[in-house]
Image (cartoon, grey):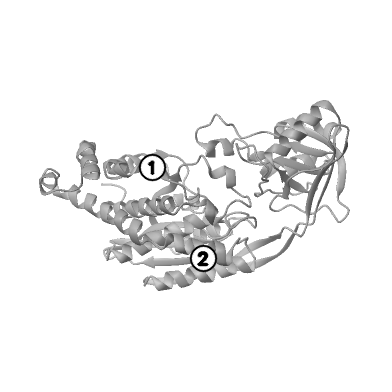
Amino acid sequence: MLSRYLYLPLLLLSFFGLSAQQNAEIPAVYEQDAREIRRIYDQVLQNSSSYDWLHYLTKRIGARLSGTPEAAAAVEYTRQMMDTLGLDDVRLEPCMVPHWQRGTYEEVRIVHSNKVGSRDLKAVALGGSIGTGPLGITADVVEVHSLNEVDTLGAAGVAGKIVFYNRPMDPTRINTFNAYGGAVDQRALGAARAGKYGAVGVLVRSMTTELDDIPHTGSMTYLPDINPIPAMGISTNDAALLSRLLQEEEVRIFMRNNSSMATEKPSYNVIGEIRGSTHPDEIILVGGHLDSWDLGEGAHDDGAGCVQSLGVIEALKQLGYKPKRTIRCVMFMNEENGLRGGRTYWENSFKAGEYHLGAIESDRGGFTPRGFSAEGHPDIFAEGYKYISQWLPLLEPYGITFEIGGSGADIGGLKDQKGMLFGLVPDSQRYFDIHHTAADVLENVNKRELELGTAAMAALVYLLDQYGIKE
């Protein structure tokens, strides 16, 4: 619908402002879109409550691991915030969630090394790990760099030992999410693979390109019929130290934690919407996940995505915008260690015969937005992506582009409804320095960067609402 030949005039509009003469040079059908997107950005950057909501979520509620009182408080808080926005419907969607407990102590120590003596390492239990028992575990360490290497070593190489996974994220990957994807299998499946051959525990190098003393947690899983063993993450500096020592001597490690899995708990997705005026059965979703790991405050992951999604609804209401389609905001529960909220939402949506024309998830942090990744069912994606690419002249003046790629864990299951799925793509270079750590706090979120993400999402919602995803 939109022509790429509008790119230069829109750049001029962006940098030099609107004048009567400039307006006359742009076809009226496009001029109004440019004005509306400008109004959205102005509204968000001057009046958004996103940062204030994030302040309450992080400083008053804090970390929000599924099944905890803090997660329950976050559900009630965001429900109340939706109520204040005057939406057509606000509701809670029940789901059962796992309740993992970290416990009260975590220790990893090199014992009686010829080089460094006994030395504590910075460590945290991985999410879902069992405990070691009160006496802990002491065993020799074997270093590996892949799951396949464990298979090669077999029981002869790992039985009775602590397996140390030390494959770094690839620093040459410009997209740090690609680097993360290339390393995270050792955290997710490392304990199951090592346990298969009789290992007694695993240590995993933290998922970051930074060399520092901050250990990262994150989800791991056990497999049926394989003996579960404790799993802990260590900082990248300590991973480097341990690797150097292993080149010079045999190393023994003491590890102790008392993590455990408690009984599942009831929880909720929080849903609010503005009903569409002409196509109310076509849904445009914006959302993030309300739960977070128990370290830090869950500011970037994913408090930012939640308040940005709320901010989209707030901005449209403040502007008096009357959508053609239903705009729905969803705070998903339990993305981090189970995806129960997302799965419950998909199941209920399909049962209700809903159609999500578009869904946008923000779950990559609150840094400066660079664009949106897009995916969809093969039957519609090529045509849909070509169609939405015509909107780029309206978004590029704000630094926003489109790329082909995954959208978000909580909305991925909607693909078979044959709408377009999007993920907000912020600058990713700093994200994994704080991801799943005690450093994920409000102080590491920039207010303006957060609000720019809110505005970008609101602009895309506007275009989806105005034009749909096909001619």
Q: Secondary structure at mark 1?
A: helix
Residue behind mark 2: 56
Q: Are there few (<14), some (14-19), or many (20+) residues within 10 Å of tag 1?
A: many
Position of 431 relative to 242 (above/below)? below
Task: Give the camera-side residue of 39 and 86.
Answer: 39
Q: CA distance from mark 1 to mark 2?
A: 39 Å
Task: Give the camera-side residue of 71 and 160.
Answer: 71
Residue behind mark 1: 381
Q: Position of residue 296 (x, y in %)?
A: 62, 55
- Say what amino acid the circle numbered 1 marks: Phe
What residue is drawn where x is 71% and y is 34%?
166
Label of residue 200 in the image:
none
> Can you tell which of label 1 and label 2 is closer to the viewer?
2
Q: Position of residue 65 (x, y in %)?
A: 63, 60
The answer to whether 12 appears left or right of 428 in the picture is left
- Say what amino acid the circle numbered 2 marks: Tyr
Callouts 1 and 2 close, C-beta under 8 Å? no
**Upstream in the sequence, badge 1 or badge 2?**
2
Q: Looking at this rendering, what residue extends furthest in the top direction? A: 248
The answer to whether 72 appears left or right of 42 in the picture is right
The answer to whether 247 appears left or right of 35 in the picture is right
Q: Secondary structure at mark 2?
A: helix
Query: In which quadrant is the N terminus drawn?
Result: top left
Q: Position of residue 47 (x, y in %)?
A: 35, 62
Q: Quadrant of residue 58?
A: bottom right
Task: Give the camera-side residue of 449 and 393.
Answer: 449
Position of 148 relative to 454 (above/below)? above
Q: Is residue 229 visible?
A: no
What residue is drawn where x is 51% and y is 70%?
77
Q: Position of residue 427 (x, y in %)?
A: 46, 42
Q: Is residue 291 visible?
A: yes
